Image: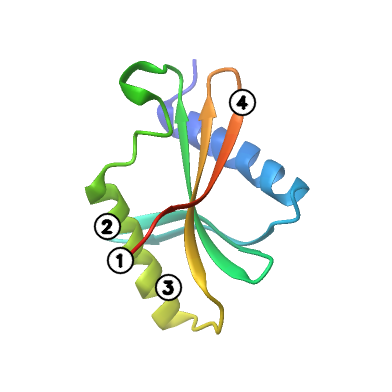
Amino acid sequence: MTTSQQRGQQAENWACEYLQAQGFQVLSRNYRLRGGELDLIGRDADYLVFVEVRYRSSEKFGGAVHSISLAKQQRIIRTAQHYLLRYPVDLPCRFDVIAINQAQQITWIKNAFEI
């Protein structure tokens, strides 16, 4: 039996492999602050992208795609702002979501939410 943390790590591994196969350059994984975490940070063409990876074994309550609350979005945005203060870049930024279901189907939602 796997723990939810192990499932989350496996989902991030799948997301990394998928994104890299699409030409995405992964720059960082699991950037953490006390108030939040960025699962993946990378470059997609001319964008710096902050990626939230969501895995759900069930489609109840909307599945992985709909599991990111407004509060979670705000934590991701605050953490991204901290990252940009620490590592300034001259690129436009966006927030993407990788949603993975139990059948390991991956949905990449570009620009899933904004500041």
- Label 3: few (<14), some or many (≥20) within 10 Å? some
Residue 17 vs 3, above or below: the answer is below
**Sequence-first tag of 3 and 1:** 1
Residue located 54% across and 82% down the image? 89
Horizontal side of residue 63 vs 88, given as left or right: left
Q: Nearer the viewer, residue 103 or 111?
A: 111
Is the Cβ of the residue at disc 1 closer than 8 Å to that at disc 2?
Answer: yes
Is the Cβ of the residue at disc 4 closer than 8 Å to that at disc 2?
Answer: no
* Secondary structure under the numbered disc 1 in the rendered image: helix
Q: Nearer the viewer, residue 86 or 110?
A: 110
Q: CA distance from mark 3 to mark 2?
A: 14 Å
How far from the left and from the top, in percent, is residue 18? Answer: 69, 41
* Secondary structure under the numbered disc 2 in the rendered image: helix
User: Given this view, does label 3 or label 4 mark the residue nearer the observer?
Assistant: 4
* Secondary structure under the numbered disc 3 in the rendered image: helix
Q: From the image, tell me which residue sits under label 1.
A: 78
Q: Which label number is shown at residue 105?
A: 4
Residue located 77% across and 46% down the image? 21
Q: From the image, tell me which residue sits under label 2.
A: 74
Q: From the image, tell me which residue sits under label 3.
A: 83
- Label 1: few (<14), some or many (≥20) within 10 Å? some
Amino acid at dot 4: Gln
Amino acid at dot 1: Arg
Is the Cβ of the residue at disc 3 closer than 8 Å to that at disc 4?
Answer: no
Q: CA distance from mark 3 to mark 1?
A: 9 Å
